[in-house]
């Protein structure tokens, strides 16, 4: 049995662009940008921000699906997901984004079996939408408390690899045993002293996977010490 669990962000990590932002730019009624600025100023958390923004969407399911079908993901992610599966390493997509959008895009690439832990997008009438938060925590302002998922993996005596790119991954990166970091998450890990490896795409992650599993991966901030029992081929 693998001693690692992988928690992988979606928007901007697996997907080429931020899917939630793209949907809001295409279908959001006026006012969603003001809510975004309130979040950036720290006046509201991401859960309140997204709940209010999604309530401003004006799109039929057919229009939303057509838009999502035009969204691209990192070209190497399907190969990475397959390599992870063959290695027997559990992986889940853990996102503060929209579960419906993630499921639609993954399905377009034949990736229908990946667990998805994300905010629940639900239709309201023919053109309205709302967001529910089945993975929220009372002590967290995010819609999806990624640290709770990480804590469950650690409780099962699993080492946690987080793959992410931005602010929604800052907290869980501090709880992880190792981070594959893109974009803004690189600087956060560097400044916080979090063990990480910078990646530009899942081509890098795919190349690193065998070394990770073998327990031989050197990271920024020093070596990740792996006991012999964790060095599974």
Image (tube, rainbow, N blue to C red):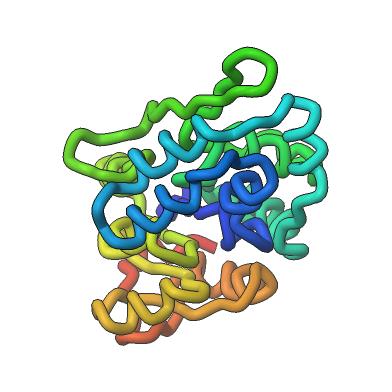
**Where is residue 20 drawn, in percent x and y?**
57, 47
**Where is residue 122 drawn, in percent x and y?**
56, 22
Residue 57 vs residue 162: left or right?
A: right
* Quarter occupied by the C terminus: bottom right
Relative height, residue 54 to residue 36 (above, below): above
Residue depicted at x 34% and y 70%: 226
Relative height, residue 169 to residue 135 (above, below): below
Residue 110 vs residue 12: left or right?
A: right
**Where is residue 228 drawn, in percent x and y?**
35, 67
Residue depicted at x 65% and y 68%: 202
**Where is residue 65 drawn, in percent x and y?**
77, 34
Residue depicted at x 29% and y 59%: 171
Residue depicted at x 48% and y 63%: 164
- The residue closer to the viewer here, 179 or 5, is 179
- The residue closer to the viewer here, 55 or 170, is 55
- The residue closer to the viewer here, 151 or 102, is 102
Residue 143 vs residue 22: left or right?
A: left
Place residue 69 in its image quadrant.
Answer: top right
Relative height, residue 11 to residue 66 (above, below): below
The reply to whether residue 94 is visible in this rendering is no
For this orientation, the residue located farthest to the top is: 125
């Amino acid at each position: 049995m693998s001693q690692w669990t992988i928690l992988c962000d979606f928007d901007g990590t697996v997907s080429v662009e931020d899917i939630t932002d793209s949907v809001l730019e295409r279908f959001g009624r006026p006012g969603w940008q003001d809510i975004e600025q309130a979040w950036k100023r720290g006046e509201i958390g991401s859960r309140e921000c997204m709940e209010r923004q999604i309530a401003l969407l004006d799109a039929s399911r057919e229009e939303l699906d057509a838009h999502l079908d035009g969204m691209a993901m990192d070209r190497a992610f399907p190969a990475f997901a397959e390599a992870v599966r063959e290695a027997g390493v559990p992986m889940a997509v853990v996102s503060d984004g929209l579960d419906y959008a993630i499921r639609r895009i993954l399905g377009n690439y034949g990736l229908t079996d990946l667990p998805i832990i994300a905010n629940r997008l639900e239709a309201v009438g023919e053109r309205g939408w709302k967001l529910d938060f089945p993975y929220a925590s009372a002590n967290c302002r995010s819609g999806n408390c990624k640290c709770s998922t990480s804590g469950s993996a650690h409780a099962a005596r699993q080492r946690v690899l987080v793959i992410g790119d931005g602010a929604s991954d800052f907290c869980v990166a501090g709880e992880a045993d190792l981070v594959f970091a893109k974009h803004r998450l690189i600087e956060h890990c560097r400044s916080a002293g979090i063990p990480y490896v910078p990646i530009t795409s899942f081509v890098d992650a795919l190349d690193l996977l065998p070394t990770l599993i073998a327990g031989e991966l050197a990271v920024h901030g020093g070596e990740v010490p792996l006991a012999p029992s964790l060095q599974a081929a």
